Image (tube, rainbow, N blue to C red):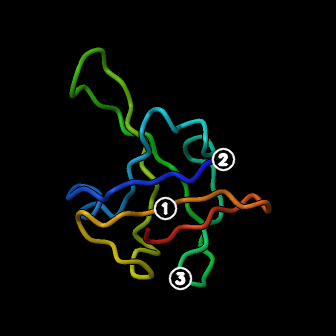
Amino acid sequence: MKPYRRKLSAEDVDTGTILITKDRWSSFPPPMQEFSVEAGGATFRTRIVAEPCSCVLPPHEHYHLEAGHFRDRLDFARGVRIVLEAREDGAYGVRNG
């Protein structure tokens, strides 16, 4: 998997999540399946949640990586870039970038 890069939005920061864009959904485990991420030298269990939305028709879902429990290991502010990379062991690394 090529690294997933995202500039954090105000919503990401407020909710403690990282939006996974539709074009990259297939790069991550399906919603509600727990997996490991390494952030700032520690390993955490997390998951992606699917949020129903009708911001544009037809109704659809937005996927968010739950990051509230490891956000203190990163610079997690609006406009900051986050990089997620799959590792060979099946976990993901998350860092600023």
Q: Residue at x 55, y 55 (%)?
A: 47
Separation of disc 2 and disc 1 at Cα?
12 Å
Q: Mark 1 points at which residue?
A: 83
Q: In this view, does 52 lie to the left or right of 39?
A: left
Residue 23 location (% of width, % of height): 48, 33
Q: Name the residue under label 2.
A: 1
Residue 39 location (% of width, % of height): 54, 76
Q: Which residue is drawn at 42% across and 63% down?
A: 82
Q: Do the residues bearing badges 3 and 1 touch, measured as CB atoms within 8 Å?
A: no
Q: How crowded is mark 2: few (under 14 residues within 10 Å), some or many (20 or more)?
A: few
Q: Which amino acid does label 3 sit on?
A: Gly
Q: Which quadrant of the structure image shows residue 55?
A: top left
Along the polypeptide, which appears first: circle 3 or circle 2? 2
Q: Which of marks 3 and 1 is in front?
A: 1
Q: In this view, does 94 lie above or below 19?
A: below
Q: Which amino acid does label 1 sit on?
A: Val
